[in-house]
Image: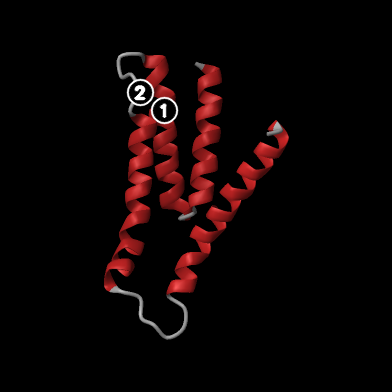
Amino acid sequence: MNQRLYAFFMVAVISLFTALLRFLPFWVFRGKRAVPPVIRYLGNVLPCAVIAMLVVYCLKDVSLVSLSGCVPVLLSVIAVILLHVWKRSTLLSIIGGTACYMVLIRLM
């Protein structure tokens, strides 16, 4: 099979399944059917759990013995926390923390 045709079909199938997974909850819980308590619970708990896992993943390789390695990370984490407490904006916190990290790794 032609490599471009293979890539096209691969992207098409991935797009189809992504759209299907995104629309499936709206199709399943449409109308007057009540959302089960388990689904409501997962909707409340999973976003925080995913963010916590991402934080652990991002900080797992930080070496605390190297000053040039840990200072930019720790200052950026503090910047993210302060921005989020101040403005309550996830997007601003992510952009501000990323910008802070990028500036600090260039300076150190």
- Residue beneath disc 2: 62
Secondary structure beneath dot 1 equals helix
Q: Is residue 19 left or right of residue 67?
A: right
Q: Is residue 94 above or below residue 20?
A: above
Residue at 35% of width from left, 13% of height from top?
A: 66
Given the image, on which type of amino acid does mark 1 rest?
Val
Mark 1 closeness class: few <14, some 14–19, many ≥20 residues within 10 Å: many
Mark 2 closeness class: few <14, some 14–19, many ≥20 residues within 10 Å: few
Residue 89 image point, x, y percent: 49, 54
Mark 2 vs mark 1: which is more N-terminal? 2
Q: Quadrant of residue 70?
A: top left
Secondary structure beneath dot 2 equals loop
Q: Quadrant of residue 10?
A: top right
Q: What is the number of the mark on residue 87?
A: none
Q: Is residue 51 above or below residue 1?
A: below
**Residue in front for this viewpoint, 62 or 2:** 2
Residue 45 image point, x, y percent: 31, 58
Residue at 51% of width from left, 24% of height from top?
A: 104
Q: Are marks 2 and 1 in contact (CB under 8 Å)?
A: yes
Q: What is the number of the mark on residue 73?
A: 1
Residue 7 image point, x, y percent: 66, 37
Q: In front: mark 2 or mark 1?
A: 2
**Residue in front for this viewpoint, 36 or 53:** 36
Given the image, on which type of amino acid does mark 2 rest?
Val
Q: Is residue 74 above or below residue 51?
A: above
Q: Is residue 57 left or right of residue 18?
A: left
